[in-house]
Structure formats: C-alpha cells, structure tokens
Image (cartoon, rainbow, N blue to C red):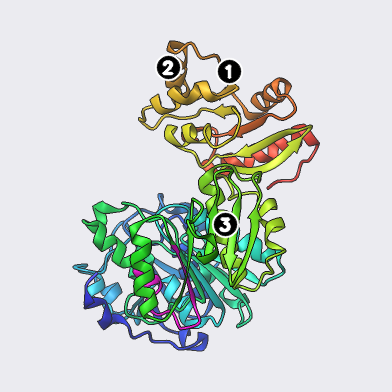
Amino acid sequence: MNGTIKSFINPPFKNLEDIKNLKVTVMGLGLNGGGVASAAFFAANGAKVTVTDMKTEAELASSMEKLRDYNIRYVLGKHEVCDFENADLVIKNPGIKIDNNIYLEKAKSIETDISVFLRLSEAKVIAVTGSKGKSSTVSCIYWGLKEAGKKVFLGGNITVSPLTFLSETTKDSIVVLELSSWQLADLKGRGILKPETALITPVMPDHQNWYGSMEAYVEDKKLIYKDMGENSVLICNYDDGWGKIFAEEAGKLHCRVKWYTGKKPSSPEKFEGVWLNKKGEGFINIQGKKIKILPKKVLVPGKHQKQNLLNSALVMYFQGVPLNKIPEILKRFPGIEHRLEFFFEKKGVKFYNDSAATIPEASAAALEAFSKPPVLLAGGTDKNLDFTPLAKNAKKAKHIFLLEGSGTEKLIKMLKKRKIKFHGPYSNLDSMIMDCYKKAKKGDIVVFSPGATSFGMFKNEFHRGNEFKSRVRALLDGHTEQD
C-alpha cells in the first residue's frame, strides 16, 4: 500500500459521544462479522449508517437479519459514489484495497473496525500475525489468560470484531488480536497499534495474488511492531530468515526480542525463549529460569500445535502468569473450536471435532496428527475437488466411517480401488456415531474430519461441528444441551 492512505487519517471522532449524528458508510457488510459489527456499533451510538456491498440482499440475508433492530440504509448489488463523498466516515472491509479505488478516493476519512477499536479502547493489547497457526495461538493465549483469572477478550481476524466488546474493556483488560496482513496494512501510518506483546508465527508465501511479491506481503507483517514501545516484547521464529529480520528491525526500535524454535538450541542457557525437544516436550528459558513447561502428552495433537502452545506460554508469562501455573494450563487446553478440537471422552475413547476440514488435504493431515491411527469419520458434499490426498492417507486410519454425499461417492470409488474397508455411507450423524462407538475400544481416538463441505445436511462447517459435538454428548453421555 502506498502513502495515499495518510490523507485519510483524520477520524471525525475522539470518543463515543463524537459518533452521534455522524454520517457513516460501511463498505462491505460481508458474512463473517466485521461489517455487521461495525454497522451495529455506529448505529447503536447514534450515527446515520449506510451499508453498501456488491453482494445482493439475498446473498447477505443472514447478516442483515442480525441488524434488523437498527435503522440502517442499504445500497446492495452496487456502490454509489455519493455514499462516499457525503459520508463523514467510511468503514472499509480489510479485503478492499484503498489504492486506485474510485469510491474510497472520494472519502473524507477511512477507518476499519480494528482502527476504531484501537482509538477508543484503553485495554492492553496482545497482537499476533503470521501465515500459519495464528488462530490456534490466539485461542490458546486467550484461554490461558482466562484460566489464570485475567479479564481478557479475543478478536480480529478470528471472525470476532473487537467492536462487539469495546464497551466492556477497561485499562485493566487484555485484548488478544489476531491480525491478518490486510488488517495490518490498514493501520499503516496511524500510530495506534502499540501491543505490549506481539508474536509473529511462521511466515510463508500467502496471498500472492494480492501482493505480487513475498517482500510486499512481509512488509505488511512488519507493521505489527512498528509502533511498539521500549518495554514491549516481540516474539520471533528462530527457525527461518524472516524471524531474524523482524528481530533486527524491532531491536532498533528498542523492543525486547524473544524467540521460539522447533528444536533444542545449541546453547539453551543463552537462548531466551521456548523450544521443543525430539521427544515432543517443551521448555522455556527466561531471565535465567529454565523449566519444562509442556509435557509430551497434551490434548491438542500435532507438533505444530505444540509449538503454538509453547509460543502462547511465552506470551502468558509476559502478561504476568506465574511460570509454575503455565504447564497445567497448557495441559488442559482443548484446542480451537472445529480444528482438531478435543471435546469429549467416554470409557477411554477420545473424540475430536475437526469439522473445519472442508478439503481432502485437511482430512488427510488429520490422520497424521495423532500418535496412533485414529478412527476417521469423514464425507460430505463435493465442490469439484480431488479426493486423492485423502484416499492415499486413508490406510492410516484404524477404521473409516462415511457420511453420505456427492464427495463421499467419489471417495468410495477410490477406497474400493485401493481395497480399503469403510463403513457406511450413513444418512445421518446418529447412526454413524453409534456404529463408530460400538466398534471403538478403550484408548481409541475418534476424529470427525469430513474433508468435504456440508451442503444439504448442514448450514456450514461450524453448524456441522456443533451438531456433531451435540449428538456425541447426547447419545453417549445423555446430555441434551446445545453447544
């Protein structure tokens, strides 16, 4: 992003009272919460809100339903220049570029839900960016700080707008923000992102169709530490070149730099940070204290998830959680919802919800995340994908149970060709769950990792995951409450 954004850094508000009667245009209502939260926030605080989106009313029906109690004007299926020219303030979706945008160039002032929150909240901020592991890391940080008795909130790229909890925050609150490169780009030059602790997860090529080069993508990632103060802490990846670059630049800004790595350092006593050994145990060395902080066995499977837990531990430490309390917190972390999420155990059989696995590759990866072959529950609707990755890895499952669907039909042909046995396909969750449980033995791991979408049977992958958890609890433990 070039310097043109600087001409828009002139918000017409300094506090909530200033928002009353402002003409606010929300560009991009969307379906993931940010636009809805912005529209609701400004309408609730007395602004005259216009929502404009290229999607139609039919496509945005679920989002509009959440705003039915507010007096909002809608311009859908198009944008009109006058809605930008006449607005006191435009709130834009992070997925919309400012540069060369004929509508945004007419705006007097442009903000995002993140920038509005940062301007108005006095809460302490923990910020996390990177290419891989952001959501799991912020979820663990949030969960751990909450377990430690802190007043903490979670928002940002994890699909929860911080505007939804702005009024609940105080200077004693901690807000954990997951920030994408696009969200960071929108904060450039504003001088308002000043996290007490920031963490950059592993960086790898992503969004290259947007950025055009890895360098441009990384430049936006760097914005996470550009305005950090002297007493702040930046946590970097010791295992790649980008981490070294971030650390060097942040050091010049007088940030304290700490590290994480997936292998034991050559000189652990000199290494300030966290690491995993070959056994899968995690250690921390900080201010002369070296302790084992992560046991070999945790609820969350996979080496990459253990690294996320360790990185979260370092953040917890810098937020005042005693070292001796952190191991027990990490041991109990159930994982992020719908992503290899441990949620239930019955007679030694552990159940994991991986409903966010909507492609065959994700389901194939789930089969490799555990220390023993899991019982796989998979299948669903095809979205013109190749099921070969899942079919190839299917031999790593102890048993396979399939939910019916067009994708399942494609997978069954591949399994038969490879002479891999399976059960089903089932027309509903109840039958599949009960047959699976009858087959399972003490010590087995059951993972619901569909590898397909959920059209017809469920609203989306989140509804699917919640239904799966609800039915497992109801059928196997007599619980009937909804998640």
Q: Residue 98: in sight, yes or no? A: yes
Residue 437 marker: none
Element class at badge 1: strand
Whether residue 136 sits left or right of residue 438 in the image: it is left
Tell me the quarter of the image containing the N terminus.
bottom left
Whether residue 113 sits left or right of residue 349 in the image: it is left
* Disc 2 from disc 3: Cα separation: 39 Å
Please name the residue that numbered disc 2 is placed on. Answer: 414
Whether residue 299 sits left or right of residue 379 in the image: it is right
Q: Position of residue 79 (x, y in %)?
A: 28, 64
Q: Tell me which amino acid carries mark 3.
A: Leu
Q: Tell me which amino acid carries mark 1.
A: Gly
Q: Nearer the viewer, residue 366 or 294?
A: 294
In percent of the image, x 41 and y 28: which residue is there?
389
Q: Nearer the viewer, residue 161 or 252?
A: 252
Work out whether mark 2 precedes mark 3 in sequence or the reverse, and give the earlier one. 3
Please name the residue that numbered disc 1 is placed on. Answer: 424
Question: How many neighbours does mark 3 have within 10 angstroms: few (below 14), some (14-19), or many (20 or more)?
Answer: many
Q: Tell me which amino acid carries mark 2.
A: Met
Range drawn in magenta: 221-236
Work out whether mark 3 precedes mark 1 in sequence or the reverse, and give the earlier one. 3
In percent of the image, x 58 and y 64: which residue is there?
285
Residue 310 marker: 3
Foreground label between 1 and 2: 2
Residue 363, relative to residue 139: is it above or below?
above
Q: Position of residue 403 (x, y in %)?
A: 56, 25
